[in-house]
Image (cartoon, helix red, strand yellow):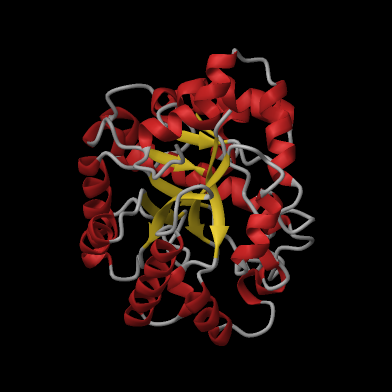
Amino acid sequence: MLKIDVFCHIFPPRYWEVMTARIAGSAYMQKRVRGIQALYDLDHRFRLMDPHEGYVQVLSLAAPPLEVLGSPAQARELARIANEGMAELCARPPERLAGVDASRPPTEPDRAGDDARDALDELGATGVQIYTNVNGAPLDQPIYEPLFALMAERDLPIWVHPSREPDVPDYRTEDRSKYDLWWCFGWPYETSVFMARMVFWGLFDRYPTIKILTHHMGGMVPYFEGRVGWGLDALGRRTDDPEDAAARARLRERPYEYFRRFLADTALFGALPATECGLAFFGAERVLFATDFPFDPRGGGLFIGETIRVIDNITASREDKERIYAGNAQRLLRLRLPT
């Protein structure tokens, strides 16, 4: 059975050189990423993929977000280097790499639409990757509307990756988040809040067919179905802020219905019950196979097999498993697939 891994991370060679020269120490997960060979060594990546028959990858640029690496002009140049590098990687026969989603710098939002359009038209990208915030600022702002409008017009997905750093503390009395909790719980929270802000921004009312792929099965949302359902139906009754009540009133449907319009991936590190929960919430037609390669304890040698084990053992029909493994990706993305 063909398996299209839609959320795999990589650093193209030239981008890797520039990025590692700009970041010192362990900032922005560099302590983690510099020890993962498959992020920058394509031959090593292929060796890790070899045991899995019918397995191909869609590439996305690994963290950190572009805006943390320099000025807006520098971020645009890095995006160009990254996108061109990934396009070159996928220019070879598609037995291994089926496509790329482009990166774009959000620090120049007035150019967001143009940058994304260039990546789609000139480099053949399958979509665009963004993060859940821009240097800590939300994306539900008019300056980012052109990007969402373009992707809705092109009918191609926006990949959403969580972003949160240790300097965002868990308690107001402290100056950092301890014990990797900024990652373990902070990233799913970031994804969930991003989704909620898009919902109450009215994004799905303006662009009913927009496709937004949330990493790690929609963060916390499927597991808090009651809170995003009946709970958010009561928005505006817990505070006196008129903005809350106005946001709920202007939506055409219940908030719950919009949350279920997001796409989600299976990058849950081999957690079968969590996968079942997410699948029940989003439905098989909106869940895509992904492993978060190569971010596992074995540098890419673990989560492919673990995620395949989970999908093979979930309570779903063979037809639904085929949708998750490849059918949904084939339907939603423009991919160069092996014959």
Front-lying residue, 155 or 163:
155
Q: Quadrant of the N terminus?
A: top right
Above or below for 260 versus 149: above
Horizontal side of 187 relative to 132 (left or right) equals: right
Q: Where residue 139 sits in the image (x, y, percent)?
A: 36, 54
Camera-nearest residue between 85 and 28 = 85
Which residue does the image show at 44% across and 37% down from the upper left?
A: 339
- Tell me if I can see residue 169 in this picture: no
Q: Is residue 45 left or right of residue 158?
A: right
Q: Is residue 1 visible?
A: yes
Whether residue 54 is situated above or below residue 146 in the rendered picture: above
Front residue of 23 and 255: 23
Q: Residue furthest top?
A: 317
Q: Quadrant of residue 197?
A: top left
Whether residue 125 is situated above or below residue 24 in the rendered picture:
above
Whole-percent x, y for residue 281 in the image: 54, 22
Residue in the picture at 58% in, 24% down: 279
| Residue 206, position as x, y percentages in the image | 22, 36
Percent across and percent down for residue 174 are: 72, 67
Residue occupying image coordinates x 50% and y 24%? 323
Residue 92 location, quadrant: bottom left
Return the residue nearer the eye: 244 or 91: 91
- Report the residue at 49% width, 54% height from top: 59
Left or right placement of residue 263 versus residue 174 in this view = left
| Number of marks | 0
